[in-house]
Image: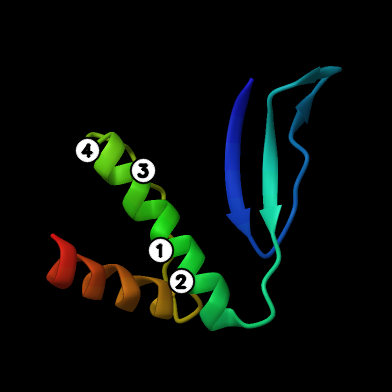
Amino acid sequence: MDRCLTVGFIADYRRSHATIGTMEVIIQPTADAASEIAARLVARQVRAKPDSVLGLATGSTPCRLYQILARMHREEG
């Protein structure tokens, strides 16, 4: 079964009666805390599998996440 990690919301994906995947939920007290965790998770995935296909959000909501990822790249490569 595929696992997907998200920060901030939960969803249960089902088709007919078969479970397609599950989602782990990590709740944080602030958007900054959630962004820090999300950035570490994205970075860990990309380092583990550089050819990963990422579906990234646009708009202002994920801006902090992207700022943290950029900082991590500058500092850690």
**Contact (Cβ within 8 Å) of mark 1 with mark 2:** yes
- Marks 3 and 2, Cα distance to the nearest angstrom? 14 Å
Mark number, residue 47: none
- Marks 4 and 3, Cα distance to the nearest angstrom? 8 Å
**Contact (Cβ within 8 Å) of mark 4 with mark 3:** no
- Marks 2 and 4, Cα distance to the nearest angstrom? 20 Å
Q: Residue 24's quadrant in the figure?
A: top right
Q: Position of residue 61 (x, y in %)?
A: 51, 78
The amino acid marked with disc number 4 is Pro
Which image quadrant: the N terminus? top right
5 lies left or right of 23: left
Mark number, residue 39: 1
**Contact (Cβ within 8 Å) of mark 1 with mark 3:** no
Looking at the image, tell me whether mark 4 or mark 1 is earlier in sequence order: 1
Which image quadrant: the C terminus? bottom left
Q: Residue at x 17, y 63 (%)?
A: 76
Q: Which residue is under mark 3?
A: 45
Q: Position of residue 58 (x, y in %)?
A: 41, 68
Q: Secondary structure at mark 2?
A: helix
Q: Which residue is under mark 2?
A: 36
Q: Establish if 10 lies above or below 29.
A: above
The amino acid marked with disc number 2 is Glu
The amino acid marked with disc number 3 is Gln
Looking at the image, tell me whether mark 3 or mark 2 is earlier in sequence order: 2
Q: Secondary structure at mark 4?
A: loop
Q: Which residue is under mark 4?
A: 50
52 lies left or right of 15: left
The colour mode here is: rainbow
The amino acid marked with disc number 1 is Ala
53 lies left or right of 75: right
Q: Residue furthest front?
A: 76
